[in-house]
Structure formats: C-alpha cells, structure tokens
C-alpha cells in the first residue's frame, strides 16, 4: 500500500513506490490553492511592480548587493541599518517557532516553498497525465509514443516553471527590465547565469522528484517541531475513540449503513476506506497518531469529511484540534497552556514592535568623522600645529542634499576645508579638512565640537566631539 511505503523506515521503498496523492475537494484544499495562487502572483510580479519612493529605485523590492543597499517599498536599508534587517529576521524566526508551538506544522502544509512548488508541479502532472489512477496506469504501461509524449510534456513544463522561478529570483537583485535583457543577450554577469542554473536544477529535482523526501530527510524544521508540540498545539488529529469504537473500524456493510447500527454493534465511525492516506502528500496514515511526516496540510481532513458526508456520519473524525480536547487533561495543565500561548504571542508582539521601531527611526543620513593618524600632529612653518580629519557622509534619502559643517570651540579661521558638501541621493561623499592652531591656543585646546546639518532637515543635525592633539 502507498501508506506502508511512505511509513517504511527503508528509504529506498519510497523511491521505488513514489507517492501519487489522490485529488480531494474541500475547505483546506481551497485554502491551499488560494495561498498557492497568491504566493506565485506575489513572487513573479514583485520584481516588475513599479514603486515610486524616496530612494528613486523604481522597483518595489530591490536587493542591490552591488551598491550595498536593500529597497523594500519605502524602506531603504544600508549596511549601517543592519539592526533593522536583523530585527526582520528575528521576527520571522520567532513567528516560525510560535506557529510551530501553537499550530504545529501549519507553515509546512500551507506556506513552505517546497510545498507550494511541489503542489504546482503536481497540478502540471495532473493536467497532462490525469488523476492519480491514470498516472499509476501510465507508469506501469509499456513505453509508447503516447507515454513518451505525456511524460516529456510534463518534464518540459516542470523545467519551464523551474527556469521561470530561477530567473525571477535573479530579478530581485538588479533592475528587472535591464537584467532580463542582459540575460537573454548574453551580457549579464556570470553570477546571474550560475544562480539561474543552480536554482533551475534544484527546483526541478526538489519539486519534481524529491518531494516528500525533502520533508522526511532534508528539512530540519520537521525535526524540532516535534519537540515544540504539546497537548495545547492545534494540529491534525484523528479522534481514535470515535473512529475505532469498541470493535474497531469496519466498512459500511448492509448491516452497518446507519450511524445507529454502527453504534449499536460497537463499531467506530471510521470505515477504513484509506482515503485520508491516499490524499496525503507525504503518505502518512494519521490514524496511527502523530508522525514526523505529517505537514498539517489538512487534506486528510477534507477527505474524511467527504466520506463522512457520503455515509451520513458526523464530520470531524479527523480535524484540526488540540490533543487536550481529545484526551482528559487536568485543569492545571490547561491553565499552563493558556499562559504559554499568551507568552508566545507577547514575544511575537514585542519582536514586531522592536522591528517597527527600528525601521521607523532610521536616520536620513550617516556621518562618520575620523582623525588622520599619520601623523597626528604636523608643525607648520609659522609654528602652528595642524590636525587632519576626514568626514564621510552617506545620503540615505531619495533627493540631493546639502550638508553644512560647523565647528565650535575653535578660533575663527582655524578650520580649513569644505563647509558645504552636496551629496546626491543614495551616495556617499568623503571630504578632508584640517584644524590649525597657534602654539599657545593648541596647548589650551583638547576638544572641539563638529556639527553636520542637512539643509532640508535641519532637525536631523548631528554634533560630534572631536579631539585635538598638540603633541
């Protein structure tokens, strides 16, 4: 059986007998299809989405590694804004962990890239080769012109989707229109062609062949998710007491066609049709309890509900629920579960607020002032002492900005350098200046203040204390 092949500990069994899940209709299949369509639309459309913002990038999402900046709608991240990027990554990690603790592997079942692309590949396979039964017949049929045409068409569309996936990925890292033209003209950077080749091949193999083996073998998320799950986790559960009854499962024979007759003869509601197993993309038999291969996609719930409707039994034999609602759990454990869920949500909210605060408080520019080290002090012909400095200003706005440099704590005329620096949008300019003081004044001056003021945003002025060395 398909389920036995999937649950076997011998890896080669799954390779010899590939899982070909049956089609199913229902709520969770509809939700998965909607998420798949939305995810593909966002992924393939975003590089082409025009976005006018202060950065002037003209592209909604642009990860411009060459110029060390990321454009995310109106948010522009420079290397100096590493904490914002770190906050986004921390929030994503916490969201993943919280979802695992509260809702099991719901990310795997509905949002994982492997799940989404495998679903798309299976839709192509179904469209060309037919339903699961037809696909199995085609696999077992002798080679013929029709079989070659069907299988070749399937793999050709798989490769086309894999190539489109890889090509779109590269468009996030440069101007989409220009890079696309350069790629097909053979003028793009070698890194673009390497990326496309690697992603095309890995997508083709992972979604077309490896499929459930990625979940069983390669994915680390499924391994630690089992540790995070507890009785309060909402996941796919088989109601064993209702399904097995006293005498176990039994097909709906002539004597067991009504719910009353099954109850009177102490048989469970499960009719042992195996439809829940046949629709599972990883071949799991949920009736055997929690298993590491279950990705909480809900397709077995749809399958079981359809069967329950057909035999006029109540829905929910397989459902999303908490284990504590199925089994008896003491009130102390339930209170602890509620406290824990509140803690998870508080942690997620705190991470979101922290990231939002970092993103909303980004400075419009950065200014780094460094003192020249070789030499620290230079004595001029008139006996005065000179210190050299360098200021680097990065304009993080989308407009040309003028920055005024002023000093305090120094006598007039001691500053030598540009006091007005114009920096284009998104650029960094470096300027050198020096401070020269007569011997007696140099001996009395240890520090002075340097203020940099953007002309259009005077409120964002920055003042930095600088040292002056007389010897």
Image (cartoon, rainbow, N blue to C red):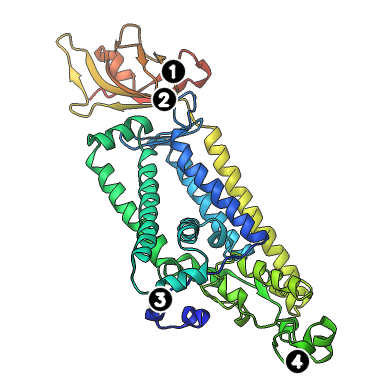
Q: SS for tag 4?
A: loop
Picture disc at residue 464: 2
Up/down of 30 relative to 469, above or below: below
Picture disc at residue 140: 3
Left/right of residue 64 with respect to residue 25 in the rendered view: left
Q: Closer to us: mark 1 or mark 3?
A: 3
> Few, some or many C-alpha atoms within 10 Å of disc 3 (few <14, some 14-19, many ≥20)?
few
> Where is residue 202 drawn, in percent x and y?
34, 57
Q: Quadrant of the C terminus?
A: top left
Q: Closer to us: mark 4 or mark 3?
A: 3
Left/right of residue 56 with respect to residue 412 in the rendered view: right
Q: SS for tag 3?
A: helix
Picture disc at residue 399: 1
**Answer yes or no: do the residues labelled 4 and 3 have beta carbons within 8 Å?**
no
Left/right of residue 257 with respect to residue 25 in the rendered view: right
Picture disc at residue 246: 4
Disc 4 to disc 1, C-alpha distance: 76 Å
Task: Pick whichever, 213 or 250, lies toward us.
Answer: 250
């Amino acid at each position: 059986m398909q389920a036995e092949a999937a649950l076997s500990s011998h890896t080669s069994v799954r390779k010899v007998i590939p899982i070909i899940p049956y089609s199913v209709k229902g709520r969770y299949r509809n939700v998965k299809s909607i998420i798949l369509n939305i995810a593909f639309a966002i992924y393939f459309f975003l590089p082409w989405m025009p976005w006018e913002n202060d950065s002037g990038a003209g592209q909604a999402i642009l990860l411009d590694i060459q110029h060390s900046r990321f454009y995310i709608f109106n948010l522009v991240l420079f290397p100096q804004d590493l904490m914002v990027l770190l906050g986004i990554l921390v929030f994503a990690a916490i969201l993943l962990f919280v979802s695992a603790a509260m809702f099991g592997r719901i990310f795997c079942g509905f949002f994982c890239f492997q799940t989404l692309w495998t679903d798309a590949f299976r839709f192509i396979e179904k469209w060309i080769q037919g339903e699961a039964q037809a696909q199995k017949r085609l696999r077992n049929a002798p080679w013929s012109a029709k079989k070659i045409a069907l299988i070749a068409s399937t793999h050709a569309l798989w490769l086309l989707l894999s190539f489109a996936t890889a090509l779109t990925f590269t468009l996030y890292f440069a101007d989409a229109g220009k890079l696309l033209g350069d790629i097909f003209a053979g003028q793009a950077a070698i890194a673009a062609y390497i990326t496309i080749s690697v992603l095309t091949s890995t997508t083709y193999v992972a979604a077309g062949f490896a499929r459930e083996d990625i979940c069983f073998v390669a994915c680390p998320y499924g391994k630690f998710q089992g540790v995070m799950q507890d009785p309060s986790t909402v996941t796919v559960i088989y109601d064993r007491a209702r399904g097995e009854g006293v005498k176990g499962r039994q097909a709906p024979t002539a004597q067991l066609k009504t719910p009353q007759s099954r109850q009177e003869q102490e048989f469970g509601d499960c009719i042992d049709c195996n439809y829940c197993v046949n629709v599972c993309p990883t071949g799991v038999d949920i009736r055997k309890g929690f298993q590491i291969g279950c990705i909480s996609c809900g397709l077995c719930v749809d399958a079981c509900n359809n069967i329950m409707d057909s035999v006029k039994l109540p829905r929910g034999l397989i459902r999303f629920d908490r284990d504590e609602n199925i089994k008896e759990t003491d009130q102390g454990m339930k209170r602890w579960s509620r406290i824990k869920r509140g803690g998870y949500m508080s942690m997620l909210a705190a991470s979101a607020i922290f990231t939002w605060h970092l993103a909303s408080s980004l400075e419009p520019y950065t200014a780094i002032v460094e003192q020249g080290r070789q030499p620290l002090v230079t004595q001029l012909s008139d006996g005065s002492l000179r210190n050299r400095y360098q200021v680097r200003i990065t304009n993080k706005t989308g407009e040309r900005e003028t920055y005024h440099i002023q000093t305090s704590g120094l006598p007039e005329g001691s500053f030598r350098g540009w006091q007005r620096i114009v920096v284009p949008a998104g650029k960094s300019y470096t300027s050198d200046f020096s401070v020269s003081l007569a011997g007696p004044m140099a001996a009395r001056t240890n520090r002075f203040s340097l203020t940099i003021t953007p002309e259009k945003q005077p409120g964002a002025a920055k003042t930095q204390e600088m040292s002056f060395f007389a010897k």
